[in-house]
Every structure is written in structure tokens, then in C-alpha cells.
Image (spheres, helix red, strand yellow):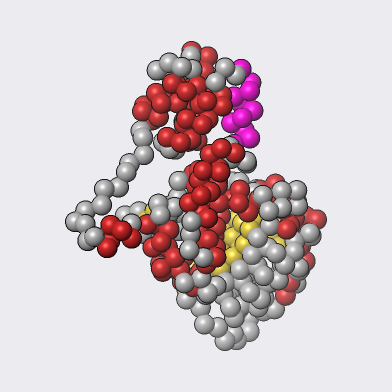
Amino acid sequence: MDILRAKKVDKIYEMKEMNESESLERFSWHAFKQKSPKEDFSEISINVVKYSGGLPLALEVLGSYLFDREVLDWICVLEKLQSIPNEQVYKRLKISYHGLNDDTEKSIFLDIACFFIGIDRNDVICILNSCRLFTEIGIKVLVERSLVIVDDKNKLGMHDLLRDMGREIIREKSPKEPEERSRLWFHGDVLDVLSKHTGTKVVEGLTFKMPGRSAQRFSTKAFENMKKLRLLQLSGVQLDGDFKYLSRNLKWLHWNGFPLTCIASNFYQRNLVSVVLENSNVKLVWKEMQVLIWSWMYL
């Protein structure tokens, strides 16, 4: 991209992903050595193709890996891919991550992969700038490297395999102890950490969403040791106890179904730049006067 910019080219062509029909054919040549899937493998082949997101590299690697395997093996592989990406695909995609200029660009990429897909670009810039990540130029670099996209509604997006690659970079640093990862997003891992109060100062971001109308209760003490927590997203969650245990470094709080009628006065809020309390029970924002500088707050 830098070379093209230096040459002042008139137009840069953006490569499109393969459509489902093209993807299925390419995958079939590697998985079955023919143009289309075998009869008993049609539905699961479509599921694998959807996972690949039209990425030729993934279609070829996964097709070759699944060649001559039984349906039960395919099912097992597809389930595994939901939490751990295929090693060959992961290694090749990871090259683009390591090619980033510095740790700020890498942090922006990982934050987007875990928390900000589908979020307005300007909002993310505001939130992550408060984390000293120089986000305006960082997102431009990620877009130029095709690691992130910005759609016509100014929302951030990312190919599913790139998202999974970013999350795997985090997971592999502590495969057996999720509390030692910088970001937590996987439902089972977050449930384990919050239930057992094992969170550590390594954790910088956490998201936990309960499906439908179900609700999960945790003690605020589960956050006591997460001193570096910057980003927190909750949905269908109730926290019981003293809100002083939430990190003073919190920059972003997105809480769908906030259960309280007012925001706790002992919840340290001076570093927050974004608070989104969707479907909340808030009747009174604060019972006591607060001195705050926030970028925005949604109730």
C-alpha cells in the first residue's frame, strides 16, 4: 500500500472474497478430488465453507486436512475450529499480525478482534485513544493491511478467520489458565474466572453475554484483582457487592440489562470515556453529585 501511495496510482482494486458456490467448488477439489461434495458430506461441507469465509488459503488447507476422513471426524474438526483455529491456517495468517509496526497497532487489532467488531469506528477511536493507543493511525494501518474493514456505516469489521487468529494469539500465551490472558471472551473461560474469583492483573478486557433473558449473578469481588481492566462488556449479568472492586482503569463499560436503579456511588468512574447501559433499570443516575468528564453515556 505504501508503494502504491508513493506512485500516486489512480485506483486501487480491492479483491473480493469468493462467493459460496466458488468456495464450495474450490474446497471440494481438495476434500474430495472432484468438483462438488460427496452426497453424505454436502451439508457439513457447506458449514466448513461458511467457516472459511471465502478465504482460498483456508479452503485449501481445510479441504486437504479433511480428505478421506469420516463424517464423525468432520464434525469433530468443525467443533474444534470454533475454539482453536487450524494450525496451518493460523500460522500463515499470523505473519500479517507480526508484520505490524509496533505494540500499539497489535493491541488495537486484538481489542477489535475481541470486543469491537460491529462498533462505530469513531467510538472505538475515542475509547482506545484513552488507552494511549494512537488509534486513528492504527486503524488506518490495519485497514491498509486488510486486517480490518470499515463498512459504509463506519462500523469496524474483520474476517472471521482473522478474528479467530487474533483470539488464538491471546489464548496460546496461557492455554490452560484463562485468568492469565490479557483478554477474555470465551463464555466458558469467563464463567470459570468470575465464578472462582481467579482474575489477575493481566486481564485488560472481558466480555460475558448470557443468551436470551437468562441472567447470571456474580460477586463484584470477582473483579478485585483485575487492576488493569480497561474494557468491560456484560449482558444479562448481575453483580452483587461493593462496586469499589471494579478497576479504576476502566475506560469502556457496555452493560446490556444493567440491573440497578442508580449507579453505585463507590464505583470509580473518573477514567471512563464511554458508558453504554442498554435496557437498564436506571431511574436515577447518581444519588450523590459526581465530577466526571465522559465522552458519552447511553441509557
Q: Is residue 70 above or below residue 151?
A: above
In the rendered image, residue 195, in percent from the top left (x then y), is placed at: 77, 55
In the rendered image, residue 44, in percent from the top left (x then y), is placed at: 52, 24
Instruction: Give the image quarter of residue 235.
Output: bottom right
In the rendered image, residue 87, in percent from the top left (x then y), is placed at: 59, 39
Name the side, left or right, on which 103 lies relative to 119.
right
Q: Nearer the viewer, residue 222 or 6?
A: 6
In the rendered image, residue 285, in percent from the top left (x then y), is placed at: 57, 75
Q: Is residue 154 above or below residue 168?
A: below
Residues shaded magenta: 70-81
Q: Nearer the viewer, residue 176 or 97?
A: 97
Which residue is pictured at 51% across the width and 70% down the height?
Answer: 133
Which residue is pictured at 59% across the width and 65% down the height?
Answer: 231
Extreme-right residue of the structure:
196
Q: Nearer the viewer, residue 29 or 42?
A: 29
Which residue is pictured at 26% across the width and 48% down the height?
Answer: 13
Q: Is residue 86 above or below residue 287?
A: above
Residue 196 visible here: yes
Residue 240 visible here: no
Quadrant holding the N terminus: bottom left
